[in-house]
Amino acid sequence: MNAVAASVVAQLAGRGLTVAAAESLTGGLVCAALTSVPGSSAVVRGGVVVYATSLKESLAGVPAAVLAADGPVAASTAAAMASGVRDRLGASVGVATTGVAGPDSQDGHPPGTVHVAVASSDGGVRVRSFTGPTALRGDRSEVRAATVAAVLELLSEV
């Protein structure tokens, strides 16, 4: 079990908060980390895996205008995914991951380009981006694992 995930679940439970996830490049790994924690059912509302761009809109609530302007790998897309999944799944907090795990570039973004977001019930959205010199390093599985760690860290700051 991930100690950070356990800490996040305990923190959220202690505050009476729930969480929902919209995941692209992590493909469900954030929900898997959270639900590996005993007692997580009191906190985790659910999640959606939205690999396809069209699903970011239809399931995670990303406005078509955001996708048209910024694309699926963007800070604005991550922010909209987090807000959308929070609203659609009825959670206190929404989290989102989008980016490129590799090995190939996607839409001009090199592997390791990642955006994670957390949207809280007070309307605040925080995004952390890893691009250019701060892009996540490693192979596909390492980028995905680092993305889970990044979104859990951001969630712990709610």
Image (cartoon, grey):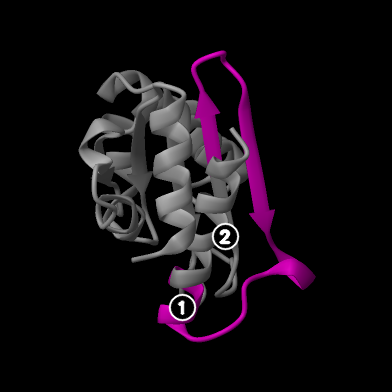
Q: Position of residue 149 (x, y in %)?
A: 52, 62
Q: Secondary structure at mark 2?
A: strand
Please state which amino acid type lies under the numbered disc 2: Val
Residue drawn at the location 66% of the way across and 48% of the way down: 128
Q: Quadrant of the N terminus?
A: bottom left
Magenta region:
117-144
Residue drawn at the location 49% of the way across and 16% of the way down: 121
- Which residue, given by chain and number where applicable, does mark 1 sit on? 102
Q: Position of residue 91 (x, y in %)?
A: 34, 23
* Left or right: 4 in relation to 42: right
Look at the image and say whether residue 118 sits in the magenta stretch.
yes
Mark 1–mark 2 distance (CA, rounded to whole Å): 11 Å
Instruction: Please indicate, yes or no, whether residue 121 appears anywhere in the rendered image.
Output: yes
* Left or right: 113 in relation to 26: right
Query: Who is closer to the viewer here, 23 or 67?
Result: 23
Instruction: Please indicate, yes or no, whether residue 64 appears anywhere in the rendered image.
Output: no
* Left or right: 21 in relation to 157: left
Look at the image and say whether residue 27 sits in the magenta stretch.
no
- Which residue, given by chain and number where applicable, does mark 2 sit on? 114
Q: Position of residue 58 (x, y in %)?
A: 26, 31
Q: Residues within 10 Å of mark 1 (few under 14, many from 20)?
A: some
Please state which amino acid type lies under the numbered disc 1: Gly
Q: Secondary structure at mark 1?
A: loop
Q: Position of residue 94 (x, y in %)?
A: 43, 32
